[in-house]
Amino acid sequence: MLLIGTTLTSMLGTGMEATFVPGDPPRDGWLALWDGDGEIDGADTEIEMVLPAGSRFRRRMVPVRRVPLDEALDPLIEVGGSEDSSPSMRAWATAAQLALELVSRGRILPTQSPGGWDAWRLGPLDPGDTHNLRRLADALPAAAHARLVPGSRPLRVSSPSSMVNAFGDAVADLLPRTAAATMAAGAPAFADPIPSPLDGATPWLEALTAADEEAAVTLRLQPPSEPDGQFTATLVLSSRTDPSLTVDASSLWDAPELVLSRLGNAEHALLVGLRRGARVWPPLGRLLDEALPTEMALSDDEVSDLLGPVVDDLASAGIGVLWPSELLKNVDLQPTMTTPSPAAVTGAGLTLESLVELRWHASLDGELLTAEEVAILVEAKRPVVRLRGRWVSADPDRLARLRTRREIGAGQALAAALGGELIIDDETVEAVVEGPLAELAGRLRALTPDREHPEPEGLKATLRPYQRRGLAWLSEMADLGLGGILADDMGLGKTVQLLALHLERRGRTLVVCPASLIGNWEREIARFAPDVAVRRYHGTGRSLENMIEDEIVLVTYGVARIDGPLLAEADWDMVVADEAQAIKNPFARTSRVLRQIPAETRFALTGTPVENRL
């Protein structure tokens, strides 16, 4: 495999295998890149691996290219899940992304490497983090950990879980070490990339490791027995190696010796956990004042804290928060937008400038709450309320919306009806649209790209399939009173599509275009719609007198800007802006004048991208 002259990123995406080799300190770990089909150019060392040979496995020395982790990390993230990469390379890319996410959340702890060096490792990890690491280890390809463990008797290869953990610790040990960190720390240990020996007393590191690896601290929330009572938080310890083993802090000193032995120094873990937690959530400090911390009563504000971002802060400090799932349900708020009645999908009854009423509805498990239940929630002004025989989470600030009504533009409501989402107070929520706007959205969704429209009577042309599809879209938009932008490339027949639409509707059409195109419109009308009357509204003798029902009037942008009020007095079925990039600035005078000319529908034609303010 030729590697000379290629970047590291391209190398990682060429199908080469990757095996992680741990280091001491962890940040000295490296990726061994190798080719299972033959020699690899640029190989600078070799490692002993156990690889398949037919139906059996055998040991062999494999030439590899050594890539330090600090050089491999960024290219690994860039390669990601590239299909060109080998399964082992994609696995380590996933491991890199997971480790980066944990480090970004502050899940790193100081430790001492086996060689006595300063090091960082991943931790404390919550159950979800541990689950993700285990899943990755279960899926780790054999090539990613096929290295023979040096000196092992009997011979064995590195286990997937040990390699995933070693890789994560290597990333955790690498990233915090910068020149800025060294200056801030005032000492090289745990900040400088150069290893520092930890020759002094390190009992605190051992205690930290024991507390993190042997016991986890959790706050288990319990509801009051009375609706107006207080929630309590009970301290629970669990084994990190066996999460099913849990002990309440109140029973800790009475627990069997066998249970306590699996929790390590449980009392130390409890106190260390509370000290960490109190730094990010001060109410936990109340438990540190007790001789035997077991549980604490919570105020409404503290309950609100434990329903929000504080949970993530506590998790970063190694303390979990457990809400009883069978007791706590969320009250869902959903906005409903209703068009004022009576209104129709077409015609003057509904325009995109109309206002639509927005009301909020509350539901629990998909069932709407009654007005009485909503009143209970709003008036309680508590984050957790007893309702329908259970405790429900009810944010008082959000519930205040239930008593408010607002009006929004029909255009915004239509966008929500098509996309299913609405942004309210910087929050994206799912929205329901009722009435004519819902019917309008349904008709728009029913428009399919393969729908074609027959040529109307009087058109002296045979439309191409894409033009018939364009005509179908124009016709539907016109019927709905919406209009649109026809942005076909130059030469694809936008004019003939508009003439077909005019022949179908048989109303008056005002075409606004540059002066250089008026002659072209006249020729196109004479060629494709010779029975249609056409008028050039231009020059000193221009007039709109004696217009007939299905006449086409041609006017330049300059004349339209001057005679906008006169043009607005006429009864137009369609207003068409050709070469519409000329009015893409909505604040320009010509743009404002054209918007004031009333019409049943309006279209913009352009073969040039409309780049700004779509």
Image (spheres, rainbow, N blue to C red):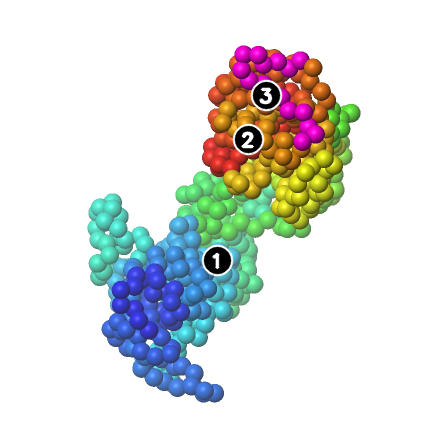
Q: Foreground residue, 576 or 382? A: 576
Secondary structure type for disc 3: strand
| Front position among marks 1 and 2 | 2
Q: Position of residue 363 (x, y in %)?
A: 71, 39
* In the image, residue 259 lies in the stretch drawn in magenta: no
Q: Is residue 319 above or below residue 405?
A: below
Residue 231: % across, % down = 60, 42
Q: Is residue 358 left or right of residue 217?
A: right
Residue 536, position as x, y percentages in the image: 59, 21
Mark 1 is surrounded, within 10 Å at the Cα level, by few (under 14), some (14 to 19) or many (20 or more) other residues, namely: some
Q: CA distance from mark 1 to mark 3?
A: 73 Å
* Circle 3 residues within 10 Å: few <14, some 14–19, many ≥20: some
User: Which quadrant of the figure has residue 154?
Assistant: bottom left
Disc 3 marks a residue whose amino acid type is Arg
Q: Which residue is mark 3?
A: 536
Left or right of 372 on screen, residue 182: left
Q: Which residue is mark 1?
A: 129
* Residue type, label 1: Asp
Question: Magenta segment, which residues?
Answer: 530-545
